[in-house]
Amino acid sequence: MSASAWVAVLLGVLLVGTAVALLDTTRRLRETREELGRMRDQATSVAVEERPRAVQAAGAAMRTAMETVTRLREQGVRGMLVSSIEDLTAWALEDRTEIVRVADEDGNVTIMFSDIEGSTALNDELGDETWLKVLQAHDKLLSRCFDQHRGHIVKSAGDGYMVVFSTPELGIAAALDVQRALARERVPRALRHHPVRVRIGLHTGRAIERDGDWFGRNVAMAARVANQAGGGEVLVSTELAARLKEQLGEDLAWRLEQTEAVTLKGLPGEHTLWRVEP
């Protein structure tokens, strides 16, 4: 066979491969468009609490479509054809949100807020340099407790933390560990000389995540519960207490003490909170 014939055969193979790749890409985009349509219909028909999941799925589908186009433009047909299974798997995992990784099978998370009681006055009393050492010791101690109970730190601001857990049990265990650790005699030197009292509140339910931050009524609820707590105290919402009793019955590792009903800023009605004791 002559050289020109070999070149013709090679070009024919390349053209066939290119056609196959383009057809596959077209199919992927069509399927993604259909998936977006289904997600849009679902987002308008499901109950309010189901909407975050539908919106997240639609967002993931949109990102998949855009990434497919970007990869085709940057890598060309050959790049799409030779993409490894490992690469595609990693690409898919990048689209998973923190909520998917942390939430339980029903999509619920347990949300904790904590802060130091009277932190502004304490900062003024100690001065910035000493206060910074106190904060560093506080952060190290709390982070260790959160890690031990698989807590995911969403954000910290000054002396406050927002942390999420996959179950109420993990959240409460972490909260009580924080209080026990702060009450021990063998705490970091800065905390031994300048003890702090941390107030903690927890609530459970679904949330919405965007750009690494978490939002929604249940996030607001957890923050309001924490605002009602005193230094050294752990308070939980009625919803969290009910979920604990539903899952564990009377075999609780803690005692829940009912408090008087309170009003929570921005949330209608009165709310009964529960104090957690070891």
Image: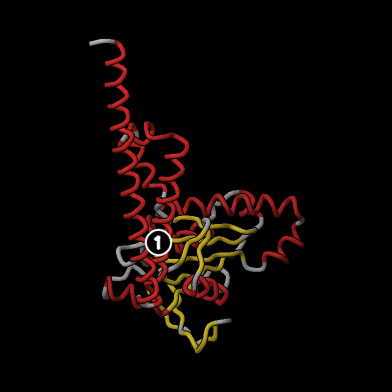
The residue sitting at 50% across, 55% down in the picture is 153
Residue at (37% x, 47% y) in the render: 93
Please report the residue visible at 41 percent of the width from the left and 62 percent of the height from the top.
56
Task: Indicate the quadrant containing the C terminus: top left, top right, bottom left or bottom right.
Answer: bottom left
Nearer to us in this view, 10 or 149: 10
Taking the spot 47% from the left edge, 36% from the top edge, the residue there is 74
Q: As displayed, is residue 85 above or below residue 34?
A: above
Q: Tell me if 98 is positioned left or right of 247 in this view.
A: right
Q: How far from the left and from the top, in percent, is residue 10?
A: 29, 21
Q: Nearer the viewer, residue 183 or 45?
A: 45
Question: Is residue 16 in view from this perspective?
Answer: yes
Where is residue 62 shown, x and y percent of the image? 43, 56
Q: Quadrant of the N terminus?
A: top left
Structural crowding at the residue carrying mark 1, measured as other residues with C-alpha within 10 Å and reported as few (<14), some (14–19) or many (≥20): many
Q: State the residue lying farthest toward the top.
A: 2
- In this view, 81 is above or below 120: above
Q: Does any portion of residue 168 appear in the rendered image?
A: no
Query: Label 1 is placed on what type of residue?
Result: Ala
In the picture of the structure, the residue carrying the numbered disc 1 is 58
Residue 269 in the image: state x and y as whole percent: 50, 89
Q: Secondary structure at mark 1?
A: helix
